[in-house]
């Protein structure tokens, strides 16, 4: 008995072994393309994709984000690879935590989605230095992104490393994995001219180098209209309907559909409407598109010092379909989900059909995709003011201005990009319920011990010029520039009116003369250089000048962005004025000594296991004091809702929770006053990043995401390093969750409401007719159904996590509305 069992087991084992060995051959996906479509495993596809950058969220967040992307109708997740995160020091690699690229790709795979790997390794992305390590800049003889051997060797080394890692895990589709496309370089076509012939040589080299890595799936290059074959050039922008690739064999692909925009310190909150994003996507598919990627689908957070610059904020929310905290940004997420459903239902006609275009005039066009068995249609209206009534094959369709109607069977309108049937969700910050309100956080503090440096100008390195701050390889934001100057009272400079003048770049300067802080300066948003000038009192004899420069993200875009000087390129001058005459003493080529970083960072004051734990003081807590460390403990807010740290009242600095940096903060920097409108945002007409902005005159960023995984159920520590001076008494933790939800459904559609997992507590407003206003301020219009809408909706929704009601006269009674746009509008409280 035993023997035969054993031999059966052995045979089974052998069988399994053979299956395991050959399974990659079975499951390998063939990815190919022609001018019309991408084919995966023999199926011609249209593909919907979304960008989620792994380091901008945490591994604990990834499954939920990817599930929401899948639920939103995406086929693929796109990410860049962030070289400087992985190789912070030359040949020292980090693939842990947020940087665990393989884990991210496998999470995408286990959720059943494809992946698009944009290796770059220059990525732009509002990421520090565009993703290139700053140490690269300091290799002798290097020139970035051009035919330069030093650069190309480093780029090839990193690209090969990534490809090898991915191959090892069998993640390329050709190996049975989920990566269907890879990208080399990024938008080089936008800057190539500046590099002359060497630029062309470089991009050809990029193509060859990529090809030689033999990944078995197509390579793409974005914004590269001379992309060497077989690279596919793709489009980035707010609209890509008029894009045509440079080769008839390349399908029409859109790698970056900007769903909103990024934010700078000093700038307002961007907003791109759901209607406009949907319009752009529908037009893209109307005009023959095959692959479309939302940049971003989830923007996330620039933790630590990863924000690009200068002046990119810590939040990278981007007004994306999933917000920074991982909540659905409604109606954008849902309106696009519906669009994806409509597009997918016509995949066959779109990828196989013959195309006929009918120009109806005045910006209106009908496109028919027809095969022998099926046909699908689009009616587009690109007129930004005029609504259109189009008669097509005997039926009349009303197509609002700047919208596209989708008719999967060429008869019934399944979707119109301007008619939003998805709820609007207004997010609310709620007080931390784990603390006993209103007890405030209890703070301790420590001064940053600058005095030695400031008083005596003690630096470890000397040079007879002002250095570019990149010399320190970005190991810290802070670099001290120190010099002393001897001035006798018979010096021609000497006068009653003396000042110091410093030319700075788009970072921050704190200036000290003879041990005293005389002022700080930073660039105004949009203008990256500044001149700091301040009166000084000098002593006859020796004077100590100490300038602290703090970087706020290195530039990430433009030709030669890598060589833009940072820190204090100078000149640094002393000026003596006598009447109309001034005497200038240029200190730029004096002997300067340099010191990197701040003591508090060296002593790891942000970390809970710092040796200096006992030195924190509870007495005489200072406010508005520069260069101050603050520390407190707190309990994590109850529940599972995402957590935001409210840094209202603070100046500028960096914050850590349990030793993990949640990013730079700067709430004292107010967003520009102008440009916000009280009028509702009009989705019609071309979007630009200054359209529909909000938050004018308010702190650019008041709330900072603290991922749940950074906190424990026990006691947590928050440390702030305050550079300018602030008051921590208002600092508090809050949770972020849907507050008010507003449902909207046109006649005969279903109105769905959801509080994302919590019960709907009450209904504030309900009307079936032509209600006016926007979510938060609805009012009844001129007509309404005869039944009590409020009571009907209350009955169907209150106490439930979600509810669905048909917007029809059957339910709400006849309306006598003359308008065609009869709809049900509901405002509910979560
Ligand atoms: C593109 C770039 C992206 C990102 C985007 C703006 O030009 O490829 O990486 O920077 O602009 O968000």
Image (tube, grey):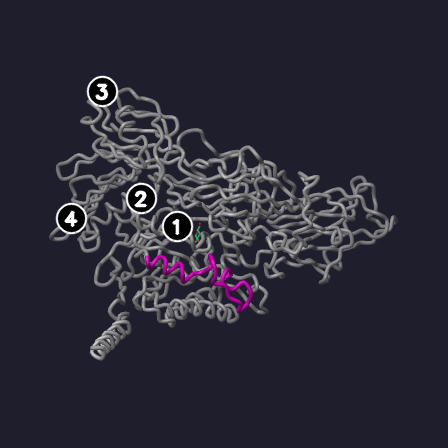
As drawn, the label of residue 295 is: 1
Q: Is residue 93 magenta?
A: yes
**Between marks 4 and 1 in the image, the one whose residue lies nearer the viewer:** 1
Q: Position of residue 241 (x, y in %)?
A: 31, 48
Whole-number angstrom distance, CA of label 1 to CA of label 3: 45 Å
Given the current orientation, which residue lies at the most extreme right position? Answer: 490
Q: Position of residue 643 (x, y in %)?
A: 47, 43
**Between marks 2 and 4 in the image, the one whose residue lies nearer the viewer:** 2
Q: If you read the primary sequence from the N terminus, does the residue marked by circle 4 or circle 1 appear first?
A: 1
In screen coordinates, is 346 left or right of 735? Answer: left
Indicate if the residue with disc 1 has its beta carbon within 8 Å of ligand 1: yes
Residue located 42% across and 53% down the image? 60
Identify the magenta region. Answer: 84-110
Q: Which residue is mark 2?
A: 336
Whole-number angstrom distance, CA of label 4 to CA of label 3: 41 Å
Q: Are the residues flagged by discs 1 and 3 in contact, CB closer than 8 Å?
A: no
Q: Which residue is mark 4?
A: 375
Q: Are the residues flagged by discs 4 and 3 in contact, CB closer than 8 Å?
A: no
């Amino acid at each position: 008995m035993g023997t035969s069992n054993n031999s059966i087991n052995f045979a089974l084992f052998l069988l399994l072994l053979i299956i395991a060995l050959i399974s990659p051959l079975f499951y390998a996906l063939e990815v190919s393309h022609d001018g019309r479509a991408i084919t995966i495993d023999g199926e011609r596809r249209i593909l919907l994709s979304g960008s989620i950058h792994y380091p901008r969220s945490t591994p604990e967040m990834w499954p939920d984000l990817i599930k929401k992307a899948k639920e939103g109708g995406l086929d693929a997740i796109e990410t860049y690879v962030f070289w400087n995160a992985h190789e912070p020091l030359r040949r020292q690699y980090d693939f842990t935590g947020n940087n665990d690229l393989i884990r991210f790709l496998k999470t995408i795979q286990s959720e059943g989605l494809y992946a698009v790997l944009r290796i770059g390794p220059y990525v732009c992305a509002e990421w520090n230095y565009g993703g290139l390590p700053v140490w690269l800049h300091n290799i002798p003889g290097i020139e970035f992104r051009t035919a330069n051997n030093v650069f190309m060797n480093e780029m090839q080394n990193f690209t090969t490393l990534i490809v090898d890692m991915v191959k090892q895990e069998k993640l390329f589709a050709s190996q049975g994995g989920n990566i269907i496309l890879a990208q080399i370089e990024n938008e080089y076509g936008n800057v190539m001219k500046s590099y002359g012939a060497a630029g062309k040589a470089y991009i050809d080299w990029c193509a060859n180098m990529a090809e030689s890595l033999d990944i078995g799936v197509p390579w793409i290059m974005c914004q590269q209209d001379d992309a060497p074959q077989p690279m596919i050039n793709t489009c980035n922008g707010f609209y890509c309907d008029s894009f045509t690739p440079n080769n008839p064999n390349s399908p029409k692909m859109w790698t970056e559909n900007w769903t909103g925009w990024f934010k700078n310190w000093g700038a307002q909150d961007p907003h791109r409407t759901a209607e406009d994003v949907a319009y752009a996507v529908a037009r893209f598919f109307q005009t023959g598109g095959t692959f479309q990627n939302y940049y971003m689908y989830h923007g996330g957070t620039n933790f630590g010092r990863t924000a690009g610059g200068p002046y990119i904020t810590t939040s990278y929310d981007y007004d994306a379909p999933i917000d920074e905290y991982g909540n659905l940004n409604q109606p954008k997420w849902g309106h696009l989900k519906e669009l994806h459903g409509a597009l997918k239902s016509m995949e066959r006609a779109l990828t196989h059909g013959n195309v006929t275009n009918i120009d109806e005039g005045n910006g209106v066009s009908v496109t028919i995709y027809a095969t022998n068995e099926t046909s699908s249609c689009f009616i587009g209206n690109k007129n930004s003011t005029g609504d259109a009534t189009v008669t097509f094959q005997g039926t009349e369709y009303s197509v609002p201005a700047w919208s596209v109607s989708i008719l999967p069977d060429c008869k019934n309108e399944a979707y119109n990009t301007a008619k939003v049937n998805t709820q609007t969700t207004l997010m609310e910050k709620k007080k931390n319920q784990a603390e006993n309100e209103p007890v405030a956080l209890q703070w301790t503090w420590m001064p940053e011990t600058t005095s030695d440096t400031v008083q005596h100008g003690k630096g470890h390195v000397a040079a007879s010029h002002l250095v570019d701050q990149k010399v320190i390889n970005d190991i810290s934001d802070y670099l001290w520039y120190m010099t002393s100057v001897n001035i006798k009272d018979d010096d021609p400079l000497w006068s009653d009116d003396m000042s110091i003048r410093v030319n700075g770049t788009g970072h921050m300067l704190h200036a000290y003369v003879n041990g005293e802080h005389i002022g700080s300066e930073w660039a105004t948003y949009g203008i990256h250089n500044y001149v700091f000038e301040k009166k000084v009192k000098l002593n006859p004899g020796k004077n100590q000048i100490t300038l602290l420069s703090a970087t706020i993200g290195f530039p990430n875009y433009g030709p030669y962005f890598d060589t833009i000087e940072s820190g204090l390129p100078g000149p640094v001058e002393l000026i003596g004025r006598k009447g109309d005459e001034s005497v200038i003493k240029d200190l730029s080529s004096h002997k300067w000594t340099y010191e990197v970083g701040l003591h508090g960072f060296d002593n790891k004051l942000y970390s809970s296991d710092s040796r200096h734990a006992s030195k924190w003081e509870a007495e005489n807590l200072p406010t508005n004091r520069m260069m101050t460390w603050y520390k407190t403990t707190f309990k994590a807010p109850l529940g599972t809702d995402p957590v935001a740290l409210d840094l209202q009242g603070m100046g500028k600095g960096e914050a850590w929770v349990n030793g993990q940096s949640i990013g730079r903060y700067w709430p004292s920097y107010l967003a520009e006053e102008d440009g916000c409108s009280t009028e509702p945002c009009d989705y019609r007409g071309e979007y630009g990043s200054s359209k529909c902005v909000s938050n004018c005159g308010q702190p650019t960023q008041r709330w900072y995401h603290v991922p749940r995984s950074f906190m424990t159920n026990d006691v947590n520590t928050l440390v702030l390093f305050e550079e300018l001076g602030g008051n921590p008494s208002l600092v508090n933790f809050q949770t972020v969750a849907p507050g008010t939800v507003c449902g909207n459904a046109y006649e005969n559609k279903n109105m769905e409401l959801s509080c994302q997992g919590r019960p709907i507590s009450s209904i504030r407003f309900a009307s079936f007719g032509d209600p006016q206003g926007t979510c938060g301020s609805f009012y009844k219009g001129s007509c309404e159904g005869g039944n009590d809408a409020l009571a009907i909706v209350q009955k169907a929704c209150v106490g439930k996590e979600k509810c669905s009601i048909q917007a029809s006269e059957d339910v709400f009674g006849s309306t006598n509305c003359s308008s065609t746009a009869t709809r049900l509008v509901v405002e509910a409280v979560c």
